[in-house]
Image (cartoon, rainbow, N blue to C red):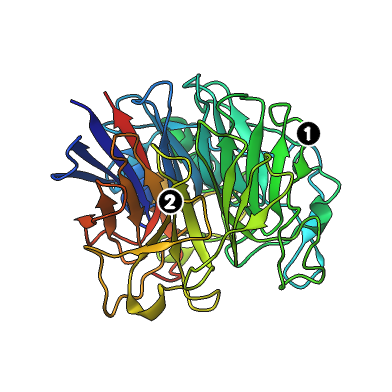
Amino acid sequence: MSKVRVLVGTRKGAFVLSSDASRKSWKVEGPHFAGWEIYHVKGSPADPDRLYASQSSSWFGQVMHQSNDGGKTWETVNNQFVYDGEPGTHRWYDGSPHPWEFKRVWHLEPSLDDPDHVYAGVEDAALFESKDGGKSWAELPGLREHRTAPDWAPGAGGMCLHTIVIDPKDNDRLYVAISSAGAFRSDDAGKSWRPINKGLHSNYIPDPDAEVGHCVHRIAMHPTRPNVLFMQKHWDVLRTDDGGENWHEISGNLPTDFGFVIDVNANDPDTVYVVPITSDSLHFVPEGKLRVFRSRTGGDDWEALSKGLPQKDCYVNVLRDAMAVDTLDPSGIYFGTSGGQVYASPDGGDTWSAIVRDLPAVLSVETQTLP
Amino acid sequence: MIKVVLPANLQTLAGTGRTVELRVEGPATQRAVLDALEARYPALLGTVRDAKTKKRRPMIRFFACEEDLSDESPDAALPEEVSTGREPFLIIGAIAGG
């Protein structure tokens, strides 16, 4: 019988939640790395027992771990992320030039076919990769050296590369998103990049339709249809049908189109999930109600999913890496909140319950569907 | 043997207790103690001082014998009480928020 493992990163440690395919009864293990901020934990699609974890601390810096037994034990791997050459400057909040400085790893994206190959998205925005299981890291400098990079500026959370998506039909095609530079695509395994922000409209930058400067929060893809991407931007939910060449808004009837997460049902590429957040100054769900919104039409038409979720006096946030889906049928949907709850729906979003309620604030949620 | 007291997060990372004992070859200095610490616990590389420049991380302090030694030269001799193991060398995470 299949199993599901949910990997949760929090402000004070990592947790591994596991269940059989019924997804009714959960075992909670952790905290791993107690006291450390866990920005991301993710498993290799090629070897589900190989996990990578990014720990960060304002005091002690960046630490990296890998596990070869599904998170039971961990070993430290290399934590040196050195920019290639002289990294130069980007724009600071006040518009002045600011030196590129490594701060932390936000997101880890293991390759689809090699457990030792993993990408790391970092702050200040750059893409690194390791081909030896984390023993060494090398920057793919073409992104940070893009001609527009001196104009990139940080969002409120820092200038982070937080999203990495690998095209499963062409592994040389990579998508990344940077707050607040926008979305970028490489067609040569990360050597060269170009912005793919046509159709994004952001009123908080001098030219709302600029080539870069958009605060993209998250991009999601269904593996059977890699040219279709869904985006939750700072404001606006968008979709592209041509690999990012053109985007159009699909916010439709959402109560607010600000938010962080977006994901796609594993069994239906047109079923999309978001969690609307009130606004950029009010980072909590609107009306005191925690609701996931689902579109079964690839956007524009959204329905509120609330069964089992708090509908009164709820003021949590759901951060950009804190939603994931499993690949069972029906697909399970998972998300974690700033209040420390991890909610699961075993039926594609129709009903929800908390796997665990009182963890530290959740930063990231990933799933693994195991045989 | 020189006694080094680690903050809780580094104990977790190194998989050790609060106090570790280190044998330091030659004069006991900050640099020598931290070199010995990182050699014994490679997981701590980069967490107390920058792995490349060897500069103390900004929110780390070094205390011993009721003195703040953080801004002393890394090559200055540590107090005799530390080098003889009678007093520990404390690595402290600065008090800065929760």
The disc placed on residue A334 is none
The N terminus of chain A - image quarter:
top left
The x and y percentages for residue A335 are: 35, 54
Residue type at mark 2: give it. Answer: Arg
Q: Are marks 2 and 1 in contact (CB under 8 Å)?
A: no
For mark 2, give the secondary structure.
loop
Q: Chain of mark 2?
A: A
A297 with respect to A144 (left or right): left
Residue annotated with mark 2: A296
**Residue beneath the point at 47% across and 73% down:** A255
- Is A168 rendered above or below residue A247? above
From the viewer's perspective, is the residue at label 2 or at label 1 nearer?
2
Residue annotated with mark 1: A192
**Residue beneath the point at 55% across and 74% down:** A280
The x and y percentages for residue B28 are: 50, 42
For the residues labelled 2 and 1, the Cα–Cα distance comes to 35 Å
Closest to the observer, A330 or A332: A330
Question: Badge 1: how crowded within 10 Å, few (<14), some, or many (20+)?
Answer: some
Q: Chain of mark 1?
A: A
Question: Badge 2: how crowded within 10 Å, few (<14), some, or many (20+)?
Answer: some
